[in-house]
Structures are given as structure tokens and as C-alpha cells.
Image (spheres, rainbow, N blue to C red):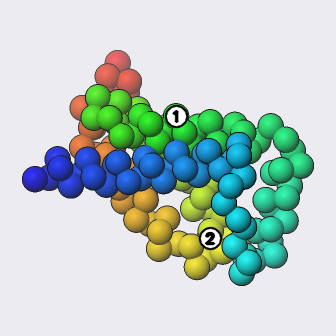
Amino acid sequence: MKSKILFILCLLTGLLFINSGLDKFFHYMPMPKEMPEKMMKAVKAFIEIGWLLPLVGAIEILGGLLLIFNRTRALGAIVILPVLTGILLANISMAPSGLPIVFVLIAIILWVIIDNKEKYLPMIRK
């Protein structure tokens, strides 16, 4: 039962990140009208940089795909973690209203990391 719940959560989280990553390439989701001005400035700066949004989008797509499959889920969680950290910091500093969903995503990723801790141990053992 626990593994089925985790699979469903990982599937939904993976699809969310895949969708978000694809939007960074194809821009099919409209910007929210009530987005704080600081956040709008940050998004415009990322767009002006040129290479940053496609890089983050590619990482989100890759991490989302890896997160869906049980065999690659541990790697997907590690790939997504830096992006999720950036999302958390952006929401703390510019748009605190988005924090509840960020905390849910963090909880899911932490569950995956804890559930797969034996896969990470060889990296930190001498």
C-alpha cells in the first residue's frame, strides 16, 4: 500500500515538473495576473539571460521523468532537489502564498530520498 501511494505521489510530482519544464520551452501557460512585482522582475531577468530557463526546464523534465519510474526515482529526487530549493527560496522571498504547495513537494521528495537512502550510502562511504 505504501509503495502504491508513493508511486502515485511520484507520478503526479513528476508530471508537474515535466509540465513546468515544457512550459519553459513552449510558454503555453499564462502568467498569473496576481503575481507579485518582485517575482515578475525575476522572471523577466531569467528570460533576458536566455540560457537559464531552458537549463532549468531541461532539469525539470529530466528529474520529472526519472521520478516517475521506481528504478530511477532516487536519482530523480536528487536531480529535482536543487530546483526545488530554488522554488522554496523564491517563494519565501517573493511570493509566500505559494509555500504550501512547495512544502508538499519537499515532503514528497524527502520521502523518496529517505525511502532510497541505501542507494545513496555508497556515495558517502569510504
Give the spatial CA distance, label 1 vs label 2.
25 Å
Q: Which amino acid does label 2 sit on?
A: Ile
Rate crowding at label 2 as few (under 14), some (14 to 19) or many (20 or more) other CA atoms within 10 Å: some
Can residue 110 be seen here? The reply is: no
Task: Say which element carries label 2.
Answer: helix
> In the figure, 96 relative to 108: above or below?
below
Between residues 126 and 13, which one lies in front from this camera angle? 13
Query: Residue 11 at x, y = what percent?
Result: 35, 48
The residue shown at (27%, 52%) is 8
The residue where tag 1 is placed is: 62
Q: Name the residue under label 2.
A: 92
Left or right: residue 84 compared with residue 118: right
Q: Tell me residue 122's x, y (percent).
A: 32, 22
- Please tell me which residue is depicted at 60% across the width and 45% down the height of the picture: 21
Q: Position of residue 77 (x, y in %)?
A: 41, 41
Quadrant of the rendered structure where residue 82 is? top right
Residue furthest to the left in view is 1
Secondary structure, mark 1, is helix
Determine which of the numbered discs, if any, sits on residue 126 in the image.
Answer: none
As rendered, which of 31 and 45 lies closer to the eye?
A: 31
Assess disc 1: are there few (<14), some (14-19) or many (≥20) residues with their C-alpha within 10 Å of its C-alpha.
some
Quadrant that contains the C terminus = top left
Which amino acid does the dot numbered 1 rest on? Leu
Number of labels in the image equals: 2
Horizontal side, residue 43 vs residue 117: left or right: right
